Image (spheres, helix red, strand yellow):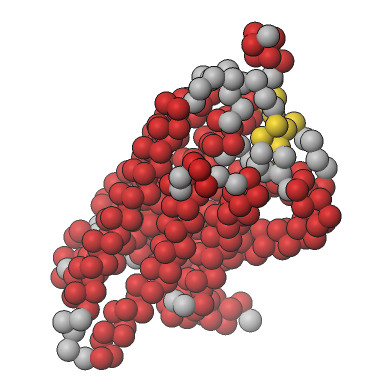
Amino acid sequence: MQRKNLTEVREFVFLGFSRFRDYQITLFVVFLVLYTLTLAGNAIIVTIICIDHHLHTPMYFFLSILASSETVYTLVTIPRMLSGLLAQDQPISIAGCSTQMFFFVALAINNCFLLTAMGYDRYVAICNPLRYTVLMSKRACAQLLCGTSGIGLVMAVVQVTSIFTLPFCHRVVGHFFCDILPVLKLSCIDTTINEIINFVVSSCVILVPVALVFISYVLIISTILKIPSAKGRKKAFATCASHLTVVVVHYGCASIAYLKPKSEDSAEQDVLLSVTYTIITPLLNPVVYSLRNKEVKEALRRAVGRNI
Protein backbone atom coordinates (compact mmCIF):
# COMPACT_ATOMS: atom_id res chain seq x y z
CA MET A 1 0.00 0.00 0.00
CA GLN A 2 2.81 2.37 0.90
CA ARG A 3 4.55 1.66 -2.41
CA LYS A 4 1.33 2.41 -4.26
CA ASN A 5 0.91 5.71 -2.45
CA LEU A 6 4.51 6.68 -3.14
CA THR A 7 3.93 6.14 -6.85
CA GLU A 8 0.66 8.08 -6.90
CA VAL A 9 1.78 11.22 -5.08
CA ARG A 10 3.44 13.16 -7.89
CA GLU A 11 1.91 16.53 -7.10
CA PHE A 12 0.38 18.53 -4.26
CA VAL A 13 -2.73 20.68 -3.96
CA PHE A 14 -2.96 23.70 -1.66
CA LEU A 15 -5.81 23.96 0.82
CA GLY A 16 -5.15 27.71 0.85
CA PHE A 17 -8.03 29.89 2.05
CA SER A 18 -10.77 27.32 1.43
CA ARG A 19 -11.76 27.71 5.10
CA PHE A 20 -12.74 31.29 4.21
CA ARG A 21 -14.65 30.32 1.07
CA ASP A 22 -17.29 33.05 1.45
CA TYR A 23 -14.63 35.79 1.50
CA GLN A 24 -12.26 34.62 -1.23
CA ILE A 25 -13.06 37.39 -3.74
CA THR A 26 -12.69 39.98 -0.98
CA LEU A 27 -9.38 38.42 0.10
CA PHE A 28 -8.19 38.39 -3.51
CA VAL A 29 -8.87 42.12 -3.92
CA VAL A 30 -7.27 43.02 -0.57
CA PHE A 31 -4.17 40.89 -1.17
CA LEU A 32 -3.82 42.14 -4.76
CA VAL A 33 -3.89 45.77 -3.57
CA LEU A 34 -1.35 45.06 -0.81
CA TYR A 35 0.87 43.15 -3.25
CA THR A 36 0.73 45.99 -5.80
CA LEU A 37 1.67 48.48 -3.08
CA THR A 38 4.53 46.22 -1.98
CA LEU A 39 5.97 45.94 -5.49
CA ALA A 40 5.55 49.67 -6.13
CA GLY A 41 7.00 50.66 -2.74
CA ASN A 42 10.08 48.46 -3.03
CA ALA A 43 10.62 49.54 -6.65
CA ILE A 44 10.50 53.21 -5.59
CA ILE A 45 12.97 52.57 -2.74
CA VAL A 46 15.47 50.83 -5.06
CA THR A 47 15.07 53.46 -7.80
CA ILE A 48 15.52 56.41 -5.43
CA ILE A 49 18.64 54.86 -3.89
CA CYS A 50 20.11 54.20 -7.34
CA ILE A 51 19.51 57.66 -8.79
CA ASP A 52 20.22 59.85 -5.75
CA HIS A 53 23.93 60.10 -4.97
CA HIS A 54 23.15 61.33 -1.43
CA LEU A 55 21.94 57.79 -0.67
CA HIS A 56 25.02 56.02 -2.01
CA THR A 57 26.08 54.88 1.47
CA PRO A 58 26.38 51.41 3.05
CA MET A 59 23.11 51.85 4.96
CA TYR A 60 21.09 52.49 1.80
CA PHE A 61 23.05 49.90 -0.16
CA PHE A 62 21.77 47.26 2.26
CA LEU A 63 18.29 48.79 2.19
CA SER A 64 18.18 48.52 -1.62
CA ILE A 65 19.32 44.88 -1.42
CA LEU A 66 16.66 44.19 1.23
CA ALA A 67 13.96 45.80 -0.92
CA SER A 68 15.07 43.76 -3.96
CA SER A 69 15.18 40.56 -1.90
CA GLU A 70 11.72 41.25 -0.45
CA THR A 71 10.34 41.77 -3.96
CA VAL A 72 11.64 38.39 -5.17
CA TYR A 73 10.50 36.83 -1.87
CA THR A 74 6.91 37.92 -2.57
CA LEU A 75 7.10 36.70 -6.18
CA VAL A 76 7.81 33.19 -4.88
CA THR A 77 4.51 32.85 -3.02
CA ILE A 78 1.93 35.57 -3.67
CA PRO A 79 1.12 35.15 -7.41
CA ARG A 80 0.23 31.48 -6.88
CA MET A 81 -1.73 32.38 -3.76
CA LEU A 82 -3.77 34.96 -5.72
CA SER A 83 -4.33 32.42 -8.48
CA GLY A 84 -5.53 29.88 -5.88
CA LEU A 85 -8.12 32.34 -4.56
CA LEU A 86 -9.70 32.52 -8.03
CA ALA A 87 -9.34 28.87 -9.04
CA GLN A 88 -8.92 26.25 -6.34
CA ASP A 89 -7.27 22.82 -6.57
CA GLN A 90 -4.46 23.98 -8.83
CA PRO A 91 -1.79 21.28 -8.53
CA ILE A 92 1.93 21.87 -8.07
CA SER A 93 4.49 19.20 -8.88
CA ILE A 94 6.84 17.93 -6.19
CA ALA A 95 9.72 19.51 -8.12
CA GLY A 96 7.82 22.80 -8.26
CA CYS A 97 7.04 22.60 -4.55
CA SER A 98 10.69 21.96 -3.65
CA THR A 99 11.79 24.87 -5.85
CA GLN A 100 9.29 27.21 -4.23
CA MET A 101 10.38 26.12 -0.75
CA PHE A 102 14.07 26.52 -1.62
CA PHE A 103 13.70 30.13 -2.78
CA PHE A 104 11.31 30.99 0.06
CA VAL A 105 13.69 29.65 2.73
CA ALA A 106 16.84 31.08 1.11
CA LEU A 107 15.34 34.57 0.74
CA ALA A 108 13.73 34.56 4.20
CA ILE A 109 17.05 33.66 5.86
CA ASN A 110 18.91 36.14 3.65
CA ASN A 111 16.54 38.89 4.84
CA CYS A 112 17.11 37.96 8.49
CA PHE A 113 20.87 38.35 8.14
CA LEU A 114 20.55 41.48 5.96
CA LEU A 115 18.77 43.14 8.89
CA THR A 116 21.69 42.04 11.07
CA ALA A 117 24.17 43.60 8.63
CA MET A 118 22.14 46.81 8.72
CA GLY A 119 22.27 46.72 12.53
CA TYR A 120 26.06 46.38 12.36
CA ASP A 121 26.17 49.36 9.98
CA ARG A 122 24.23 51.49 12.51
CA TYR A 123 26.54 50.30 15.31
CA VAL A 124 29.67 51.36 13.41
CA ALA A 125 28.12 54.70 12.35
CA ILE A 126 27.19 55.67 15.91
CA CYS A 127 29.76 53.91 18.09
CA ASN A 128 32.82 54.15 15.84
CA PRO A 129 32.17 57.02 13.40
CA LEU A 130 35.85 57.88 12.81
CA ARG A 131 36.48 54.42 11.34
CA TYR A 132 33.15 54.14 9.54
CA THR A 133 34.54 54.51 6.00
CA VAL A 134 37.16 51.85 6.73
CA LEU A 135 34.94 49.32 8.51
CA MET A 136 32.07 49.79 6.04
CA SER A 137 34.09 49.98 2.83
CA LYS A 138 32.74 48.64 -0.46
CA ARG A 139 34.73 45.45 0.09
CA ALA A 140 33.30 44.99 3.60
CA CYS A 141 29.75 45.56 2.31
CA ALA A 142 30.30 43.01 -0.47
CA GLN A 143 31.63 40.48 2.06
CA LEU A 144 28.62 41.01 4.33
CA LEU A 145 26.27 40.61 1.36
CA CYS A 146 28.00 37.41 0.24
CA GLY A 147 27.83 36.10 3.81
CA THR A 148 24.09 36.73 4.14
CA SER A 149 23.38 35.17 0.74
CA GLY A 150 25.65 32.19 1.42
CA ILE A 151 24.01 31.40 4.75
CA GLY A 152 20.57 31.54 3.15
CA LEU A 153 21.55 29.21 0.30
CA VAL A 154 23.29 26.65 2.55
CA MET A 155 20.42 26.54 5.05
CA ALA A 156 17.87 26.25 2.23
CA VAL A 157 19.74 23.30 0.72
CA VAL A 158 19.82 21.57 4.13
CA GLN A 159 16.11 22.16 4.76
CA VAL A 160 14.82 21.23 1.31
CA THR A 161 17.06 18.17 0.94
CA SER A 162 16.01 16.79 4.34
CA ILE A 163 12.30 17.19 3.46
CA PHE A 164 12.14 16.08 -0.18
CA THR A 165 14.04 12.85 0.40
CA LEU A 166 10.99 11.73 2.43
CA PRO A 167 8.21 9.58 0.95
CA PHE A 168 4.83 11.33 0.69
CA CYS A 169 1.47 9.62 1.11
CA HIS A 170 -0.81 12.68 1.15
CA ARG A 171 -1.21 15.43 -1.43
CA VAL A 172 -3.22 18.24 0.23
CA VAL A 173 -0.94 20.93 1.70
CA GLY A 174 -2.78 22.73 4.51
CA HIS A 175 -1.37 26.08 3.43
CA PHE A 176 -1.23 28.46 0.43
CA PHE A 177 2.42 27.69 -0.42
CA CYS A 178 5.03 25.01 0.22
CA ASP A 179 6.11 25.95 3.71
CA ILE A 180 8.25 23.55 5.72
CA LEU A 181 5.91 22.23 8.42
CA PRO A 182 2.78 21.79 6.23
CA VAL A 183 4.80 19.73 3.71
CA LEU A 184 6.37 17.63 6.49
CA LYS A 185 2.88 16.59 7.57
CA LEU A 186 2.34 14.87 4.20
CA SER A 187 5.08 12.30 4.77
CA CYS A 188 4.34 8.59 5.24
CA ILE A 189 6.99 8.11 7.92
CA ASP A 190 7.96 9.58 11.27
CA THR A 191 9.44 13.07 10.74
CA THR A 192 10.83 13.70 14.22
CA ILE A 193 14.41 14.01 12.94
CA ASN A 194 13.30 16.44 10.22
CA GLU A 195 11.38 18.50 12.77
CA ILE A 196 14.49 18.65 14.95
CA ILE A 197 16.56 19.78 11.95
CA ASN A 198 13.95 22.43 11.16
CA PHE A 199 13.90 23.66 14.77
CA VAL A 200 17.70 23.83 14.98
CA VAL A 201 18.00 25.70 11.66
CA SER A 202 15.12 28.05 12.57
CA SER A 203 16.66 28.73 15.98
CA CYS A 204 20.04 29.52 14.42
CA VAL A 205 18.71 31.83 11.72
CA ILE A 206 16.36 33.69 14.08
CA LEU A 207 18.04 33.72 17.49
CA VAL A 208 21.60 34.38 16.26
CA PRO A 209 20.61 37.49 14.25
CA VAL A 210 18.34 38.66 17.09
CA ALA A 211 21.22 38.30 19.56
CA LEU A 212 23.61 40.20 17.28
CA VAL A 213 21.09 42.99 16.68
CA PHE A 214 20.34 43.15 20.41
CA ILE A 215 24.04 43.49 21.26
CA SER A 216 24.42 46.18 18.57
CA TYR A 217 21.55 48.20 20.00
CA VAL A 218 22.73 47.85 23.60
CA LEU A 219 26.04 49.39 22.50
CA ILE A 220 24.26 51.97 20.31
CA ILE A 221 21.93 53.10 23.10
CA SER A 222 24.75 53.28 25.65
CA THR A 223 26.69 55.49 23.21
CA ILE A 224 23.69 57.71 22.41
CA LEU A 225 22.97 58.30 26.10
CA LYS A 226 26.48 59.73 26.46
CA ILE A 227 25.78 62.42 23.86
CA PRO A 228 25.50 65.70 25.83
CA SER A 229 22.88 67.50 23.70
CA ALA A 230 19.25 66.43 23.50
CA LYS A 231 19.22 67.34 19.80
CA GLY A 232 22.19 65.07 19.14
CA ARG A 233 20.56 62.17 20.99
CA LYS A 234 17.31 62.65 19.06
CA LYS A 235 19.13 62.69 15.72
CA ALA A 236 21.07 59.53 16.58
CA PHE A 237 17.90 57.71 17.67
CA ALA A 238 16.15 58.83 14.47
CA THR A 239 18.77 57.10 12.29
CA CYS A 240 17.96 53.79 14.01
CA ALA A 241 14.17 54.05 14.39
CA SER A 242 13.22 52.72 10.95
CA HIS A 243 15.57 49.76 11.15
CA LEU A 244 14.49 48.90 14.69
CA THR A 245 10.79 48.98 13.72
CA VAL A 246 11.34 46.55 10.84
CA VAL A 247 13.53 44.30 13.02
CA VAL A 248 10.90 43.96 15.76
CA VAL A 249 8.10 43.05 13.32
CA HIS A 250 10.25 40.77 11.13
CA TYR A 251 11.85 38.71 13.89
CA GLY A 252 8.66 38.73 15.96
CA CYS A 253 6.61 37.12 13.18
CA ALA A 254 9.38 34.65 12.33
CA SER A 255 9.74 33.59 15.98
CA ILE A 256 6.01 33.01 16.42
CA ALA A 257 5.78 31.06 13.16
CA TYR A 258 8.81 28.76 13.49
CA LEU A 259 9.74 28.55 17.18
CA LYS A 260 6.35 28.03 18.80
CA PRO A 261 5.64 24.63 20.44
CA LYS A 262 4.15 21.98 18.18
CA SER A 263 1.20 21.62 20.57
CA GLU A 264 0.10 25.13 19.62
CA ASP A 265 -0.23 24.33 15.90
CA SER A 266 -3.45 25.60 14.34
CA ALA A 267 -4.01 25.51 10.58
CA GLU A 268 -6.13 28.69 10.57
CA GLN A 269 -3.68 30.61 12.76
CA ASP A 270 -0.72 29.43 10.68
CA VAL A 271 -2.32 30.63 7.44
CA LEU A 272 -3.22 34.03 8.90
CA LEU A 273 0.25 34.40 10.45
CA SER A 274 1.83 33.49 7.12
CA VAL A 275 -0.08 36.36 5.51
CA THR A 276 1.75 38.67 7.92
CA TYR A 277 5.27 37.60 6.99
CA THR A 278 4.61 37.03 3.27
CA ILE A 279 2.55 40.17 2.53
CA ILE A 280 2.52 42.66 5.42
CA THR A 281 6.22 42.56 6.37
CA PRO A 282 7.51 43.12 2.80
CA LEU A 283 5.09 46.08 2.55
CA LEU A 284 6.27 47.41 5.92
CA ASN A 285 9.85 48.04 4.74
CA PRO A 286 9.12 50.68 2.07
CA VAL A 287 6.40 52.27 4.21
CA VAL A 288 8.65 52.60 7.28
CA TYR A 289 11.71 53.73 5.36
CA SER A 290 9.78 56.28 3.29
CA LEU A 291 7.60 57.75 6.05
CA ARG A 292 10.04 57.65 8.99
CA ASN A 293 13.32 58.28 7.20
CA LYS A 294 14.14 61.94 6.58
CA GLU A 295 16.87 61.28 3.99
CA VAL A 296 14.62 59.06 1.86
CA LYS A 297 11.79 61.62 2.01
CA GLU A 298 14.18 64.36 0.90
CA ALA A 299 15.45 62.14 -1.94
CA LEU A 300 11.85 61.54 -3.05
CA ARG A 301 11.19 65.29 -3.08
CA ARG A 302 14.32 65.89 -5.16
CA ALA A 303 13.34 63.15 -7.61
CA VAL A 304 9.76 64.45 -7.95
CA GLY A 305 10.98 68.05 -8.31
CA ARG A 306 13.45 67.01 -11.02
CA ASN A 307 10.66 65.37 -13.06
CA ILE A 308 8.13 68.22 -12.84
Residue 164 to residue 252: above or below: above
In the rendered image, the quadrant that contains the N terminus is top right
Q: Give the residue displayed 30% in from the left and 49% down from the top.
A: 208
Quarter location, residue 97: top right
Q: Is residue 146 above or below residue 160?
A: below
Number of numbered labels in the structure image: 0
- Residue sticking out furthest to the front: 263
Q: Residue at x 69, y 19 (%)?
A: 9
Q: Looking at this view, is 186 or 233 the one in front? A: 186
What's the residue at 75%, 48% (across, down)?
Answer: 19
Quarter of the C terminus within the rendering: bottom right
**Picture residue at 79% right of the left edge, 36% below the top:** 89
Vertical placement of residue 184 versus 307, above or below? above
- Going by the image, does 294 lie left or right of 144? right
Residue 68 to residue 305: above or below: above
Residue sitting nearer the eye, 288 or 301:
288
The answer to whether residue 68 is seen in the rendering is no
